[in-house]
Amino acid sequence: MPLDTALNSLGFAKPASDTRVVVAMSGGVDSSVVAAQLKEEGYDVVGVTLQLYDHGAALAKKGACCAGRDIHDARRVAESMGFPHYVLDYENTFREAVIDEFADSYLAGATPVPCIRCNERVKFKDLLATAKDLDADCMATGHYIRREMGVAGAELHSAADANRDQSYFLFSTTQEQLDYLRFPLGGLASKAETRALAARYGLSVADKPDSQDICFVPDGNYAAVIEKLRPGAAEPGEIAHVDGRILGEHRGLIHYTVGQRRGLGIGGLDEPLYVVKLDVEARRVIVGPKEMLATRRVPLREINWIGGGGFTDQAEREVLVRVRSTRPPAPAVIRPLGATEAEVELLSPEQGVSPGQACVFYAPEGSRVLGGGWIWKGR
């Protein structure tokens, strides 16, 4: 093939028709648009949907809807656009890699983010391996994040639409995975553009509502799922002030998170109180004034670095970090303690920093994602 052959839209020096791409299809509008768009551009598209969970089993409700609706929607899109679609049973893998850790983390007083673990351990690991087994040149998803080519190779960048940006949930993407992945929606200005594309392609999911909850917690009731997975998890205990006063009794640690104010059941006090700590061994919820939530130093482990060079090449780095998905990146300094551990110093204290959440690194200027790590309690 001549050296001057133009690259196609997925970055390959060959016609779209000779480029096979596996599209991870959730049954939602985003991944459906990706699949339809690539098919329209002439790519050899293969749709794959993962059966990850069963709502009925998770909630112990007779007749509760399983993931069948999403699978049906993905299949209808594939049929309408004329490309093959496969459903893979990953329930056991998903439970072992994501759901069990979610439950155990809550019981340990952390606030887990299972969507990150799902991307890391299932979608970008097992599904990506399946895509390679299908001889695909790459795998595409409906995530709102950008993959751009830099001087040293593929880079991860936050989405053009800050309101849809999913970089917080993809910080653990490795360089090898990034080389293989594609994110066609990352450059769109708004979700309205995605829905307009879905309507143009005549997709049945064009008006399908966005999912607001963790997929296996469809009504947002984490405690109900954890009680089902870990019977006896909701044992009551004491609610104590940081000064030692016993203020009441709680319904089980799984009902509380660091930073919580509402629903504590300890009204009639002179000061507003927040959950500042969950003492798992004593089964005690510790509450205190808001200023006790302020954190400046954040210990991290399981660091994933995709910022170029070695993570420990510098004693410290000035970056922007995001300690919750809903917060904007803020200035900080990273001090590596090893290849996969670090301490982050926030230049301005943040409230409600909780073990189990992610801390994601961004370049001080621009939109590049440098990696991140998991917040833990430290030594």
Image (cartoon, rainbow, N blue to C red):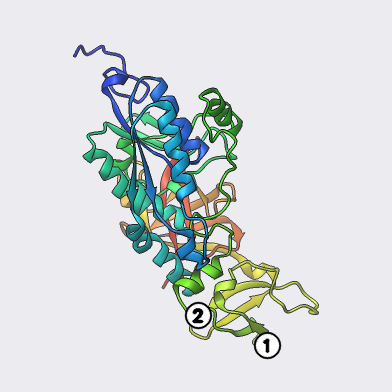
Q: Nearer the viewer, residue 349 or 241?
A: 241
Residue 331 seen = yes
Whole-angstrom CA distance, mark 1 to mark 2, is: 18 Å
Q: Quadrant of the N terminus?
A: top left
Q: Which mark is residue 280?
A: 2
> In the image, 332: left or right of 173?
right
Is residue 242 depicted above or below 371 in this figure?
A: below
> The disc labelled 1 sits on which kind of residue?
Arg
Q: Where does the image place residue 247, in percent across and percent down from the top left? A: 70, 85
Residue most toward the front? 63
What SS does tag 1 mark? Answer: loop
Q: Where does the image place residue 43, in percent across and percent down from the top left? A: 34, 23
Q: Nearer the viewer, residue 248 or 134?
A: 134
Which residue is denoted by mark 1 in the rendering?
245
Q: Where does the image place residue 357, in percent across and percent down from the top left? A: 49, 60
In this rendering, which labeled residue sits more in front, label 1 or label 2? 2
Q: Nearer the viewer, residue 340 or 42?
A: 42
